[in-house]
Image (cartoon, rainbow, N blue to C red):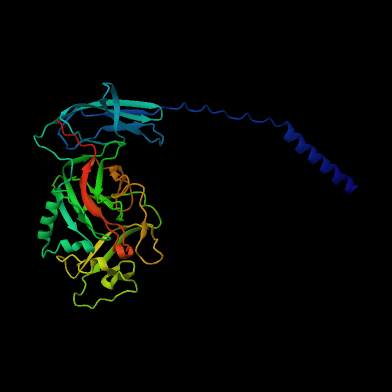
Amino acid sequence: MKKYIKYSLYVLAFSAFFGCSSDDPKEDPVSVDPKPAVDPTIKLSLKADYTVERYKAVEVNPEVVIENGNGLTPQYKWTLKVTDKAGATKDSVIGDAKILHFIAPLANNYTVDFTVTVDKVVKQASTKVTVSETGKTYNSKALTLLDYLPSPHYGMDNYEFATKAEVLERVREELMEESVIPLGTFGGSISVGFDHTVINAYGKRDFTIKMNSSSTVKFTPVSVYVAYDANKNGLADDNEWYEIAGSEYRKSSTVKNYEVTYHRPNPDKVPVAGALDWQFDKEYLKWSDNKSANGFITKTARGEYNNYYPQWVGDSYTVKGTKVSLPVKDVSDGSGKAFNVGTFEWGYGGIKDPSIDISWAVDSNGNKVHLPGVDFVKVYVPTLIEIGASDLLTNFFKEVEDLNFTTGK
């Protein structure tokens, strides 16, 4: 009897539960109407006109307010109407950043159009830039010598001056005469200035570096720094220099912030001849770097009577820069009398195409910088390589020239 009652209660409970669960009305799902999408809006304000002198920069800074952007990235475009050789007028892009530093080589009235695009929303505005004549005559070449500090090389024998002032005077003369100027090995450099700002032309290369060239002698490519005279003091200030990041800049074999210290050779030291006939003194000039390495530069038979060390500097001096790896191979069966020397693809002087785009400039952390143009250029040797009997791998500077220079008024 107890068993029967227990079973009856179980069935009753199960039936009650089942009945409740099946008979309870289900709530209809709540439907929420989606909010209609709101397109971004752009408010754009641009000053009506600007004035500036030829080859000088004027900052065009529009006010741009974007609402409902929802994290979208605005696209900026500055254009200028130009007439091609066939007489057709078209829009030429001159900038893609919010702020435009406008520089023109010719005196004229320019209409500059500004376009802001956010998703599918486009807003445009225009301004007029009046560029006046300066009355000055400009040169396409950088003929102002700022500084010169070569590294050791047998070519230093032609620069045996007691003071730096004497050396700079000699180099100025050679710069004007378009003579080649020796830079030496790693860190050897020359800095020159233009009489105008070389414009950072959109999508084009801006200046070229001419070095020594020869079909028989091997030379190293040279690295480049540029500076824009932002504060208009006529000087290349330390905080205005930026490196041109060429094809080798981001390779694992490239060493940033490399330093080498060269020590003046003892003129009374007895030469330590090497095993090969061209090794006149294999312990001629001592060097050390900031990577705990050190060694000697060998004086070769070709430079036996030369002084490799710049005479106007102290007993030692340190040079700095980015060191790059250049493929060099001895092809003379170990005699050290014939070498194959490689090259770089782009962004250096002394290569097949030595033209430079200012847009390749980066800061000390490798971040891209946006320069309206450059006023100063520094060229330096980025390699520390000996090529046997041919001595140190080096290069000789000739000139830097503005590729987009315009002489007309």
Q: Residue at x 85, y 42 (%)?
A: 8
- Residue 171 vs residue 341: left or right? left
- Residue at 30% from the left image edge and 42% from the top image edge: 359
Relative image position of residue 307 (x, y in whole percent): 19, 67
Residue 327 position (above or below residue 369): below
Nearest to the observer: residue 35 or residue 21: 35
Residue 243 shows up from this direction: yes
Work out whether 308 lies above or below 321: below
Determine which quarter of the picture holds residue 218: bottom left
Please identify the residue farthest to the left as the structure is shown.
135
Q: Say which of 173 and 362 sits in front.
A: 173
Question: Image point 38% across, 26% down: which residue?
Answer: 121
Task: Using the image as rendered, state which of residue 311 and residue 393 is in the foreground.
Answer: 393
Q: Is residue 389 above or below residue 270?
A: above
Q: In which quadrant of the rendered view does residue 389 lie?
A: bottom left
Q: Do we see residue 325 in this rendering?
A: no
Residue 259 in the image, given as x and y percentages of width and height = 28, 63
- The image quadrant where one finds the C terminus is top left
In percent of width and height, residue 196 lies at 16, 41
Give coordinates of residue 33: x percent, y percent: 52, 26
Residue drawn 45% across the image and 27% down it: 37
